[in-house]
Every structure is written in C-alpha cells, then in structure tokens.
Amino acid sequence: MTTWQNILKKSITTPDRLSGLPRAESIRLAEVCRTYPMRINPYYLELIQKTGRPLWRQAVPDMLELSDTAGVEDPLDEENLSPVPNLVHKYPDRVLFLVCSECAVYCRFCTRKRKVGRPEMVISDTTIDQGLAYIRKTPAVREVLLSGGDPLLLSDHRLERILAALAAIPTVETVRIGTRVPCTLPMRITPELVTVLRKYHPLYINTHFNHPAELTPEAKQACALLADSGIPMGNQTVLLKGVNDEPGIMQELFLGLLRFRVKPYYLFQADLTRGTDHFRTPIATGLAIMRSLIGRISGMAVPTFALDAPGGGGKIPLTPDYITSQDNDCLKFVNYQGKTCVYPDCGIG
Ligand SMILES: *Cc1c(COP(=O)(O)O)cnc(C)c1O
Ligand code: SF4
C-alpha cells in the first residue's frame, strides 16, 4: 500500500476524535455524521489545527446541517438529468461522469452531500460501463468531466481503465478531471499517477482550493507535478460564509493559485443544497468581491463568478455592472477605479 492510502486510512470519521471539542458537543455532532458522513485525513486535520476557523468550518460537522429547511436535496436536478446512473447530461456537448463515491475530506458544503460518501452512491464496474456506453452512443458529447466524489481517490489502475476507454471513443475530444485532492491530500499526486495521466492528453484538471491557508508546500509540489506533465490546471472556489467571504482573502487565494500555475476558473455562489444554508452569502457579497478584484490584480487571477441555476438550468455568470447608462448616443460606464467613462457608440443596432 502506498503512502497516500495509509494517510487516508488514518482519517478521523467521528467528532470525538477532534481535540478541543467538549464531550457533549461531540455527542451532538455524532448525530450529524449519521446523516452526512465525516472524514478528515491527518494532512488536512493538521492544517485545520494550524489555521482554525476557515478550515474547521469546511470539514467539521455543524448542528446547523440538520436544521436547514431552506435547501433541497438535489438543487441542480442532477438525478433527473441522468440518462444512466451517475452520469449527468445537462449541456449538449459535455457530460459529468461520477466515477468515485469517496473524497479525501467530506466538505460540509458539498453540493452532492445527498450522496457523496454515503451508501446510496453506488459506483461499480457496471455503472462505469453504463456511463461509457452512453458516451459511446452519444457523439454530441465532446468533453467528459470526471467527478464524484473524487476521481483521484481511485487507484491508478482503475483510473487508467476509464481514461483508456474514453481515449478509444473518437467523438470525445477532451477529458477534464475535477478533484480536490491537490488541496486536501496532495501526497496522492505521485510520479506514478502523473505517468498515467500524461498519456491521455488533452487532459485538464480542475481543482478546488477555498482558502490561502490551503496553499501549502505540499499542495505546491502536487500542482507542480501536474503542471510539469503538461496538464493545464484550473480552480473552482466556492464562496463560503466564515471561510472566504472577504476580498482580501480571495485576492490572496487567487494570486497564490496563479503562482502554483493554477488558473482561477470559477467562483461559485453556494448551491441551495439542504444542510448548507449556514454557508450561503448574498449574491451581493460575491459581486463586491469581483469588483474588488477586476482591474486591480492580473486578469489571469480573476475567475468567473457564477451560480448554478436551481433545477438544472446551467451556470449563470454574474458580473458586476460596469455600464451606468446606454442610449442612442453613447454608452456610459465606470472603470475599475469608479471613474466615469464614455464610449461614443450607438446603443442600438
Ligand atoms: C458545471 C458542469 C459542467 C461544466 O460546465 P463548464 O461551464 O464547461 O465548466 C458540465 N456538466 C454539468 C452537469 C455541470 O454541472
Ligand atoms: S471534494 Fe468535492 S465532491 Fe468531495 S465532499 Fe468536497 S465538494 Fe463534495
């Protein structure tokens, strides 16, 4: 067994293993874990102990998960958009293929907390083969996004079986892996893994960092291995109350990612998932953060702020409004400094 598998095996899965938590509190939180599983591996646990609240909130259960009445189980209507189990076909030319039910840490804000890490999420050779068969017979699908759970918790061998099968489908042009492992278990990115991955270009990886404290030397090494293998990397951040809902934190995170050769891709408004209401910020918070970034730091470090429309409508970009008026004579707008500018263009036609 390799090191990362040993580390994962030593994960804590019950609140009584958290140091510093009163016994009564840990008994109450154990109830949350019976509904939504907990897993914190030793690497991320140490980071939590160093950093405190922003990382604690991401990984440690909270009683509020059970009292949320605002959210819905499947806000993006993924189950209804699945022609076969664990494959979501929402956009015509790309599919989301769930190939692993486990993660290195179970994030409390997970959009798929209805199933990730729970016995309901059954992924087997049969579901993988059904997904591959669907992609084979649906030539409109140009891109396959591997997700879960976390695809990089599969063994190298199982992952390669999927990548090789996709490579053999001529209508699939690109593959994207969505993984939080570079952030939550960076030692999983081994030289052996990248030897497998680099055989399957064009392959993209989108990772998921939420806070600058997650940008550790270990994470840097993981991203360097991937980037050196020619894998273009993007990052998806979820905007989370009490974790990263401040302009200064976001700026530090996005500039840090750029130094890791990871391009900030999306900043997501938290989905309306049941059990995550305590993380949700008003849309205005995200727009204010975007305004604080645009023009002030490298455009390379600025992601698209988006919400995933409830009911499966797809991702909607949310951009602060820079246009202040538009009529037949001209367009008036403000620049990043708040200065009014005029562009002498007819608004209509
Ligand atoms: C987010 C998502 C995609 C990918 O969308 P991009 O805008 O290309 O990143 C594809 N399918 C589903 C179901 C998704 O949720
Ligand atoms: S890593 Fe992703 S899929 Fe897994 S629990 Fe976190 S948000 Fe959910």
Image (cartoon, grey):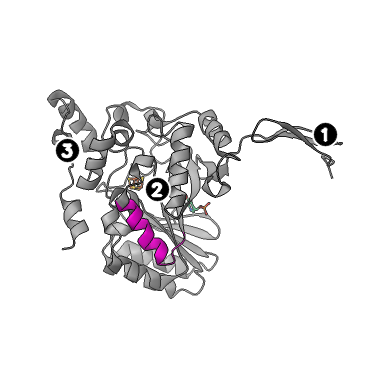
Q: Which mark is residue 327?
A: 1
**Percent position of residue 7, x then y:** 18, 53
> Assess mark 2: CB under 8 A from ligand 2?
yes
Compared to residue 14, the image places residue 165 above or below, namely: below
Can you tell which of label 3 and label 1 is closer to the viewer? 1
Instruction: Tell me: 97 left or right of 303.
Output: left
Q: Which mark is residue 208?
A: 2
Q: Badge 1: few (under 14), some or many (20 or more) residues near its Cα, within 10 Å?
A: few
Q: For the magenta stretch, what is the residue range?
A: 218-232
Q: Amino acid at mark 1?
A: Asp
Reading the chain from its start, which is encountered first: label 3 or label 2?
Answer: 3
Question: What residue is rendered at 55% in x and 42% in y?
Answer: 297
Q: Which mark is residue 14?
A: 3
Question: What residue is rendered at 28% in x and 32% in y?
Answer: 52
Q: Badge 2: few (under 14), some or many (20 or more) residues near its Cα, within 10 Å?
A: many
Q: Is residue 228 magenta?
A: yes
Secondary structure at numbered mark 2: loop
- All told, the count of numbered labels is 3
Q: Badge 3: few (under 14), some or many (20 or more) residues near its Cα, within 10 Å?
A: many
Q: CA distance from mark 3 to mark 1?
A: 61 Å
